[in-house]
């Protein structure tokens, strides 16, 4: 961990980072040559009164992550805001197949930016619905399937990650490299996978791996993941927050309607000021539960009317949300005062903190005002 950063902040804020903003052959083949997330972001339009779209990047522009100067500027902005480091989403699809690997590979090989990082395994299949609208009249097709071939692949995966784990910039918890899993329940042999990687880590001079499972559902998911052997849980409970605002049964009924008759359904929208009342709970006070903070949530650039949309987010409301998360971790040991920021740059989901034309650096400035000692 970055000790100097810890001394200056009330919490260890780690920002989820999407390495998507550059063309890859898999996307070119489906969406057309040169496709990136920016295609969806620029085309987004407001769907109801009070819905702000499109959200246009300011200081960094419509950047290309193949450019090292972009990555350097991102690190400068994040460091200035008190963010400890980036958690790069890492796509290992099985059989050695990777996606979107270039930005992080260059960060690792060049040593730049000199800014802390860790990895999160985005262990989900690459589908057409990942990046664009899919409705009743379009089938959701798998572009690259997530597979778990077994030990040989697990070992190859570990050996790739080992280069990162051994980097002095890598973020650690209790001396162990921090490693998150997106679909935390999907690995068919979790206990074996954890044991194998911990054994390999010790063989290579590490005390083990700090495995973190991401939950996006209800508080009950925390106990489920911890019982599966995870060291900690990232508590991204926006589903529960939405159910609390709308009513759990009303939310379930709406989901059924929206999946069956997409074009007839009402947009699933929530005021940000209502949602933030429920995003941080008492469970986030547990030593092995890491609260998740959301600047906003709006997947309409990707999903159109099928998106879940939070609207009305402002720097003032964002400040209240961050303060609740900081308050939840204040009695934990310094090592475990972790807050996951979702996200640094998920523009297609509306959860980003990079400067935009509407607010400039206000969200970064607000974060700094809350977390810096």
Image (cartoon, grey):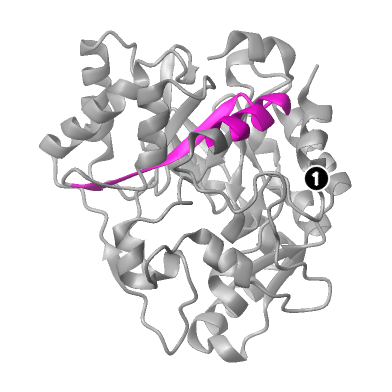
Q: In this view, does 373 lie to the left or right of 128?
A: right
Question: Residue 217: image x %, image y %?
Answer: 54, 54
SS at mark 1 in the image: helix
- The quarter of the picture where the C terminus appears is top right
Residue 300 vs 100, above or below: the answer is: below
Question: Residue 52: image x %, image y %?
Answer: 77, 67
Residue 49 seen in render: yes
What are the residue bounds of the magenta stretch? 71-94
Q: Quadrant of residue 110?
A: top left
For label 1, count other residues whose C-alpha is less than 10 Å away and answer few (under 14), some (14-19) or many (20+). Answer: many
Give the residue displayed 72% in from the left and 68% down from the top.
53
In the image shown, does 136 or 315 lie closer to the viewer? Answer: 315
Q: Is residue 21 left or right of residue 84?
A: left
Q: Magenta includes 80? A: yes
Q: Is residue 209 left or right of residue 282?
A: left
Look at mark 1 in the image and give the residue it sits on: 318
Residue 6 vs 371, above or below: the answer is: above
Give the residue displayed 34% in from the left and 15% down from the top.
166
């Amino acid at each position: 961990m970055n000790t100097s950063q810890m001394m200056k902040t009330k919490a260890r804020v780690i920002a989820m980072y999407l390495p998507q903003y550059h063309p890859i052959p898999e996307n070119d083949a489906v969406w057309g040559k040169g496709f990136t997330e920016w295609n969806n972001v620029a085309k987004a339009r407001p769907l109801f009164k009070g819905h702000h779209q499109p959200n246009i990047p300011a200081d960094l522009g419509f950047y290309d992550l193949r450019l090292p100067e972009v990555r350097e500027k991102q690190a400068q902005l994040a460091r200035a805001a008190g963010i400890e480091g980036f958690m790069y989403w890492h796509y290992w699809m099985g059989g050695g197949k990777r996606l979107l690997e270039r930005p992080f590979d260059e960060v690792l090989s060049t040593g730049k930016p000199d800014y802390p990082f860790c990895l999160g395994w985005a262990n989900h299949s690459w589908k057409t619905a990942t990046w664009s609208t899919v409705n009743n009249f379009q089938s959701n097709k798998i572009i690259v399937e997530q597979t778990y071939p077994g030990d040989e692949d697990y070992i190859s995966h570990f050996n790739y990650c080992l280069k990162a784990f051994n980097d002095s910039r890598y973020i650690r918890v209790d001396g162990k490299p921090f490693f998150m899993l997106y679909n935390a329940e999907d690995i068919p042999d979790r206990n074996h996978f954890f044991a194998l990687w911990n054994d390999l880590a010790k063989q290579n001079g590490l005390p083990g791996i700090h495995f973190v499972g991401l939950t996006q559902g209800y508080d009950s998911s925390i106990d489920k993941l911890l019982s599966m052997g995870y060291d900690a849980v990232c508590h991204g409970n926006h589903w529960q927050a939405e159910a609390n605002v709308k009513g759990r049964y009303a939310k379930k009924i709406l989901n059924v309607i929206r999946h069956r008759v997409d074009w007839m359904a009402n947009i699933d929208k929530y005021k940000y000021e209502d949602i933030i009342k429920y995003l941080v709970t008492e469970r986030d006070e547990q030593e092995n539960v890491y609260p998740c903070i959301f600047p906003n949530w709006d997947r309409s650039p990707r999903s159109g009317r099928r998106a879940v949309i939070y609207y009305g987010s402002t720097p003032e409301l964002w400040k209240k949300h961050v303060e609740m998360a900081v308050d939840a971790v204040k009695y934990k040991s310094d090592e475990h005062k972790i807050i996951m920021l979702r996200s640094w740059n998920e523009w297609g989901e509306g959860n980003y903190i990079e400067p935009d034309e509407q607010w400039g650096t206000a969200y970064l400035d607000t974060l700094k005002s809350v977390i810096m000692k």
